[in-house]
Amino acid sequence: MEREHYKRKIQELTLLYDISQKLDQSLDLDKIIQPVLMSMAEDMGLIRGMVTLYNRQTERIQIAASYGLSDKEEQRGAYQPGEGIIGRVFKTGKAVTIPEIKNEPHFLNKTGVRKEESIKNLAFICAPIKIENTPIGTISADRPYSDSKKLEEDVKLLSIIGSMIAGAVKIRRRVDEEKELLREELTSKYKPDNLIGTSTAMLEVYELINQVAKSDATVLIRGESGTGKELAAHAIHMNSLRSDKPFIKVNCAALPESIIESELFGHEKGAFTNAINKRIGRFELADNGTIFLDEIGDLTPATQVKLLRVLQEKEFERVGGSKTHSINVRVIAATNRPLEKLIAENRFREDLYYRLNVFPIHLPPLRDRRSDVMLLTDYFTEKYSKTNGKPIKRISTPAIELLMSYHWPGNVRELENCIERAVLLSTDGVIHGHHLPPSLQSAESTGTSIHETLEDAVAKLEKELILDALKSTKGNRAKAARILGLTERKMGLRINKYSLMPSIFHTFS
């Protein structure tokens, strides 16, 4: 007996040493907790294991890593403090041992991984993960039932491992806090007032804006539609030495080809039909200031030539005029189109591209800056609450989950529209998940999860196609088979399989 006890202690020490080595390898918990659980499973004979951490934003305890669970099962494993065994361990800060899961009414099995036939003789142990005596999550495991003494020893070991994970979490949080302080310092130094976001991608944009703003360099802003290219252009102007001068905006895609040249450069009286007065163009209006040419990739070839001259010579003529006008204008252009591809197709001048692309700035899509989603959501919620006189007190957890999991193809503009709609629909001062557009809804949030197998779905489609073919051929099996690319024998087999009656289509006109 003594020898067995000694052997077990050696195994435990070896496991703890192995875990400490793994925890020292990286600050990324997503990378290290999974190997820790695998080591525990091998050494302790566990069937499944998982680590949950409390999410302050959603106010739920969520699975951070697991062993023996699928991604879908992990997603189901979210608990309120006090809910189920995991919620109770988190709330009380005390470990729990359940010798047999089947006899425990508070065991919820929210992940759905434990089937009724597999919980016989299955035990569950769960210990809190604490930092300075405050629970931040739990560590739990399924294991085959054994005597109570063995389970108590395992839960003590689990508590020790939980403490080791808590130390790793504490270090990561300290590093995150230091990063956040640095981020705040960089943000306060570079962030323009009209742009929102503290993600790494946006900090890089702010730094570029800060670097180029004081110069007169031409800037080309690239990015998908809805990423805020006009806001970035305005930020450059407002931080430039021309901030007290005009900022003129031109949407090149919105102007008809017949008038775009007149809009940009103006025209003389009588230059064309209906030109009853002289007109000052946008470039003249922007003299000594900044002109923002949005959707620059949509300019006609003729206008591209004239724009190139303005960039090179700083001069132009009005439409219908011969007098050359000199101007002092800073040009900021923007596009969501692939200019390099347009050049290859001879639809955009290469020399103009190089004149515009002096200082390129790329605005990241919202899907690449997910940490900014809630910042933007809070901003738009406050904005439209004031605009519509509807105070919104909070955003529900399901709504937050939908906002964070959506891929946002329309970027910030789409998010703004969604929040404006949600504010208008809210009747209780809360934005709920059902206030968000159908495009954001998930199968779980709408109760439309798939309830049939792939085989059943394929069979249903096959039956529908055969019925359509029989109907169009008035029940003629041979013709229906040819339409579907089947032999008559295979068609007969399928008609028998689905108990179809071709004769009912004989009278169809």
Image: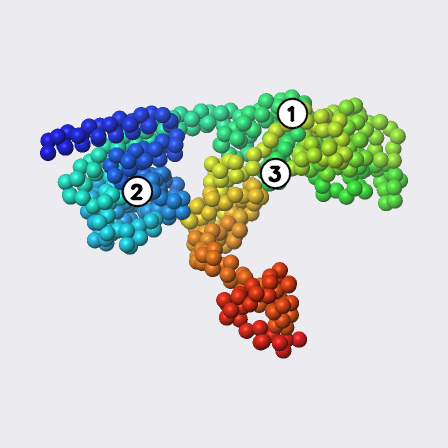
**In the rendered view of the protein, which quadrant contains the N terminus?**
top left
N-term-proximal mark, 2 vs 1: 2
Task: Tell me the amino acid under the disc marked 1.
Answer: Phe
Q: Residue 224 carries which label?
A: 3
Q: Residue beneath label 2, please?
A: 48
Q: Which mark is residue 297?
A: none
Q: Which residue is drawn at 30% across and 40% down?
A: 49
**Cα distance in 3D space between marks 1 and 3:** 18 Å
Q: Which of 171 and 472 is in front in this view?
A: 472
Q: Position of residue 169 (x, y in %)?
A: 33, 31
Q: Where is residue 164 in the image (x, y as percent from the top left)?
A: 27, 30
Q: Residue at x 20, y 46 (%)?
A: 145
Q: Residue at x 58, y 33 (%)?
A: 363
- SS assignment at label 1: strand
**Cα distance in 3D space between marks 3 and 2:** 44 Å
N-term-proximal mark, 1 vs 3: 3
Q: Which residue lies furthest to the bottom in this view?
A: 507
Q: Residue beneath label 1, please?
A: 359
